[in-house]
Image (cartoon, rainbow, N blue to C red):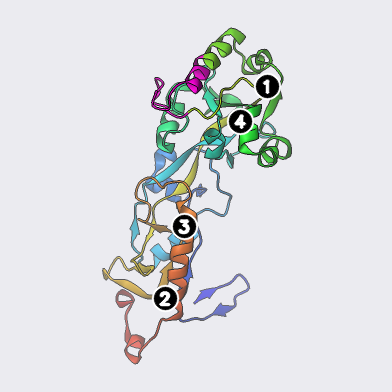
Amino acid sequence: MFYLQLGNEISGKAVVLATGGFSCDHSKEDSLLQEFAPEKADFPTTNGPWATGRGVKMARAMGAALVGMQNVQIHPTAFVDPKDPAATTKFLAAEALRGKGAILLNDKGERFVNELGRRDHVTDKILKFCAKNEKAGSAHTAFMVMDDQAVEDFGRASFGFYAKIKGFFKQFNTLEEVANYMGIQSSKLKKTLDEYNEYTNLSLSKEDKFGKKVFPVALKHPPYYVAVITPAIHYTMGGIKIDKDAVVYNEFSGKPFKGLLAAGEVTGGVHGRNRLAGNSLLECVVYGRIAGHNAANVRYSASDATLTRTDL
């Protein structure tokens, strides 16, 4: 049972909460980010204004247990839009860009991390080795650099969406132009790329000083493409506690509610402390199906009518 804005009441034998996470919860009075992960509350997010944890808050108000609320995932690469660099909602720069050869450089023109490392590892290195960018709201930013071969391998149609439609990447014909845009000496940029490119000709077992073993492409095929990226809140692993049947736990009774289920990012505990890429969609499919099936099969008996709040 729930209430709509128009005051209509809809009754049903079960409710499935699928309202998403709280990555954009910057409310002044009851922000879940401020309550459970205040050290991350000032990061931008790849989520829109709908990701305010309303489902979590509703369930919590009626006694639902929460789990893992402090586990908030930061994605290391979200685009800084040149048209609105200080925007608090960013567009995700997918891992596939780095998987096909994009590298990350700081404001000195230096690499500082294995670009294919875990999200939390790459994020930590950006915060440590990259300067704050006043135009981007004082966020730590890095340059994402690709060449034409990396773009080809990624897929020109998909890359065109980022570069031409969204305008995140700038195109340069020479390394001198790239260096000028980054505000560094061209000799420094050339040295960085030469060092990186050496590893593309070596055995896959050879690590560089950042622990990187896989080097998808030598960055020597102009034109070059450069975007500015910054870490952003991407996913909240914490949320409502559910059991294997996707039924919400009652914090006070220590047992599941009858007829209240949840699936997706509104739930917690499924991904542990750091979700692996792609698993959120899998979670939605698996627990969405389980929740829907079990909601349809809810049955009530006459004794259920006498249950108190803590019995539910």
Q: Secondary structure at mark 2?
A: helix
Can residue 21 be seen here? The reply is no
Percent x, y of residue 292: 47, 73
Percent x, y of residue 1: 49, 77
Say whether residue 3 is left or right of residue 112: right
Tag nearer the camera, 3 or 2: 3
The vertical placement of 199 against 122, above or below, is above
Residue underneath mark 4? 150
Q: Which mark is residue 294?
A: 2
Percent x, y of residue 122: 44, 32
In the figure, residue 269 lies in which quadrant? bottom left
Q: Which mark is residue 222?
A: 1
Residue at the spot 41% in from the left edge and 45% down from the top edge: 72
The residue type indicated by label 2 comes to Asn
Q: Main secondary structure of the magenta part?
A: loop
The residue type indicated by label 4 comes to Ala
Q: Secondary structure at mark 1?
A: loop
Magenta-colored span: 195-214
Q: Secondary structure at mark 3?
A: helix
Question: Label 3 near label 4: C-beta < 8 Å?
Answer: no
Image quadrant occupied by the C terminus? bottom left
Count neighbours of disc 3 (C-alpha within 10 A) and say few if under 14, some if 14 to 19, many if 20 or more: few
In the figure, residue 227 lies in which quadrant? top right
Tell me the distance, in whole angstroms, between the alpha carbons under discs 3 and 1.
38 Å
Can residue 65 be seen here? The reply is yes
Tell me the distance, in whole angstroms, between the alpha carbons under discs 4 and 1.
10 Å
Count neighbours of disc 2 (C-alpha within 10 A) and say few if under 14, some if 14 to 19, many if 20 or more: some
The vertical placement of 83 against 222, above or below, is below
Residue at the spot 60% in from the left edge and 28% down from the top edge: 228
Residue 1 inside the magenta-drawn segment: no
